[in-house]
Image: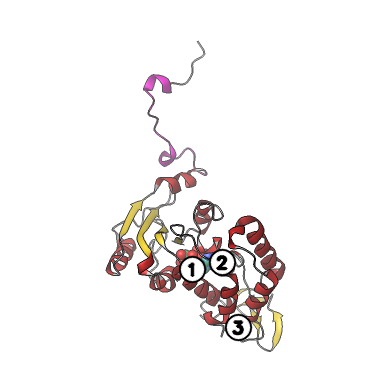
Amino acid sequence: KWKGEGTTQNLESIFIGRCYDYIRIVNPAVGEKNCSELWEAFRNAFINKDPCNILPKDYELFIKLAFHTIPANKSLFWENNQLLVKSFTSGARRYMSLSDALFGFVADFLIWCGQANSTGLDYESCPTMEECENNAVDSFWRMASITYAQHSSGVIHVLLNGSAEGGAYPVKGFFADYEIPNLQKDKISKIVIWVVDDIQGPDRDSCGKNTVKILEDRLKALGYDVTCTDNYKPVLFLLCVDYPDDSNCILSSSAPPAQRRPISSD
Ligand code: ENP
């Protein structure tokens, strides 16, 4: 009956399995967590309720149980480049985006919703954002985003896609609406923005231009020390894995030309 896809099959097993994977393998530094209790708290936020009337605060207990600190200087906010972020953070080894924290990790890529007057999940369909804002998935990410932003500290990183249609910084979106307003200014030393274009993609947005300028101005007006870099090399090189022959991906050698000639057979 809804327009969106239904609950991911095996949601409970995936959720609980991810929770154990996280606390045992991915990031044991978070300490002991009760994964079944986490699942119950998560499920109780949205079952047996009108699927269009789930609020961020319904996930409060889940967040409280799953919470752990976000290491200083490791926060990474992003828009329009989820898969790139996944490889760049390297499962919390390099940076810790929200989906590398336990409270985002368990839900990443999943869909879920319940139904009024039933304790079952709806595997047929779930409401989209257009059908209702207060759906189970969006309210979850709002609560998780708010928590993540409130606990981010030190140098904050923001990875944006300069080829995104409509601009690298969506002026309405999780980052703009739920994360920026919840950053704790006194804990933040600086905000580093990286705008990376898709290789062979259009250059729609860059530092100091269009929506990135709007973002820089907004953060400066809030009193942050802001820097912005276009096509930050470490991220660009990660994209180059799929485009080894593109001109943006060829490393210029510092060796003298004689040493760069192909080896001849004579
Ligand atoms: P999209 O639209 O590119 O990607 C949404 C996908 O990312 C969904 O599969 C969602 O899982 C997963 N996801 C991971 N982290 C978040 C998240 N954090 N979030 C919403 N979805 C997330 O991403 P968005 O909507 O623009 O969100 C990007 C935001 O995430 C940025 O603000 C960044 O700083 C933040 P699922 O379970 O919904 O399928 C917050 C909101 O980390």
Determine the residue positioned at 68% across, 78% down.
Answer: 122
Q: Is mark 2 on a helix, strand or loop?
A: helix
Tag 2: residue type?
Answer: Gly
First along the sequence among labels 1 and 3: 3
Circle 1 residue: 148
The disc at residue 51 is 3
Look at discs 3 and 2 and give the one toward the viewer.
2
Q: What stretch is highlighted in magenta?
A: 242-261
Mark 3 neighbour density, 10 Å: few (under 14) some (14–19) many (20 or more) = many
Is the CB of the residue bearing disc 1 within 8 angstroms of ligand 1?
yes
In terms of image quadrants, where is residue 100? bottom right
- Residue 89 image position (x, y, % from top left): 51, 54
Picture layout, residue 128 above or below residue 215: below
Mark 2 neighbour density, 10 Å: few (under 14) some (14–19) many (20 or more) = some
Circle 2 residue: 104
Look at discs 2 and 1 and give the one toward the viewer.
1
36 within the magenta span: no
Q: Is 4 positioned to the left or the right of 119 in the image? A: left
Determine the residue positioned at 44% across, 73% down.
Answer: 178
- Residue 257 image position (x, y, % from top left): 37, 22
Picture layout, residue 116 above or below residue 210: below
How many numbered marks, from 0 up?
3
- Residue 23 image position (x, y, % from top left): 64, 61
246 within the magenta span: yes
Tag 3: residue type?
Answer: Pro
Is the CB of the residue bearing disc 2 within 8 angstroms of ligand 1?
yes
